[in-house]
Image: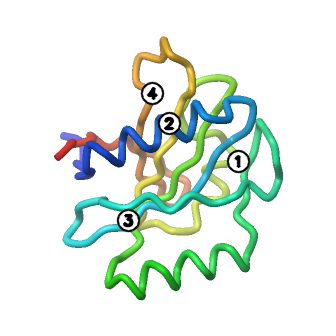
């Protein structure tokens, strides 16, 4: 049985809007909440400005973490889009998964994507898909 990640429905809508807003670039950001429920999207700028990779600049990342702490929240997820190809973790995504307790959300901007929002647990190079529970 797959692990469940709880997320507000409005967060899922915001993630899709972000992926479809600039479909030629990977969008990215952090997801925060409390008690295991993701309730806040913290968009970031893709410092690589790439359709094939993303990176959040260190100063922006620190600012986002400060916002999470100031709000009494915790980091629950990290998101980015895959403008081209399937929204499953790439080898680059797996190698750069530095937060083993976070859910990694990968979005597809394609209107006909069977699952435009998917989430994964990535620990020690191992990937398992999570079940999204919208609340």
How far is disc 2 from disc 4 in space, using C-alphas?
11 Å
Disc nearest the viewer among 2 and 3: 2
Give coordinates of residue 110: x percent, y percent: 56, 19
Q: CA distance from mark 4 to mark 3?
A: 19 Å
Marks 4 and 2: in contact by CB < 8 Å?
no
Marks 4 and 1, how far apart at CA: 20 Å
Mark identifier at residue 17? 2
Considering depth in this image, is 79 or 68 the residue closer to the camera? Answer: 68
Is the Cβ of the residue at disc 4 closer than 8 Å to that at disc 1?
no
Q: Which quarter of the figure has residue 109?
A: top right
Q: How is the image coloured?
A: rainbow
Closer-to-camera residue (116/126): 116
Nearer to me, 76 or 4? 76
Reading the image, the residue beneath label 1 is: 92
Task: Give the SS element for disc 3.
Answer: strand
Percent coordinates x, y for residue 62 in the rendering: 63, 81
Q: Is residue 37 above or below residue 35?
A: above
Dot 2 lies on which element?
helix
For marks 1 and 2, the one nearer the N-term is 2
The residue lying furthest to the top in this view is: 112
Looking at marks 4 and 3 on the same chain, the residue that comes earlier in the sequence is marked by 3
Q: CA distance from mark 2 to mark 3?
A: 20 Å
Q: Quadrant of residue 133?
A: top left
Q: Does residue 56 appear to the left or right of 135 in the view shown?
A: right
Q: Which residue is mark 4?
A: 116
Q: Which residue is mark 3?
A: 76
Q: Is residue 59 above or below residue 9?
A: below
Query: Are dots 4 and 3 in contact, CB under 8 Å?
Result: no
């Amino acid at each position: 049985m797959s692990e469940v990640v709880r997320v507000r429905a409005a967060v899922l809508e915001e993630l899709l809007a972000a992926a479809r807003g600039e479909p030629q670039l990977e969008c990215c950001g952090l997801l925060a909440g409390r008690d295991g429920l993701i309730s806040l999207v913290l968009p970031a700028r893709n410092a690589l400005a790439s359709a094939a990779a993303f990176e959040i600049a260190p100063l922006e990342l620190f600012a986002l973490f400060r916002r999470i702490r100031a709000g009494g929240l915790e980091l629950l997820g990290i998101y980015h889009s895959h403008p081209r190809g399937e929204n499953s973790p790439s080898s680059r995504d797996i190698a750069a998964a530095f937060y083993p307790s976070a859910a990694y959300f990968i979005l597809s901007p394609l209107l006909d994507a069977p699952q435009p929002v998917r989430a994964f647990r990535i620990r020690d190079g191992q990937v398992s898909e999570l079940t999204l529970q919208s609340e």
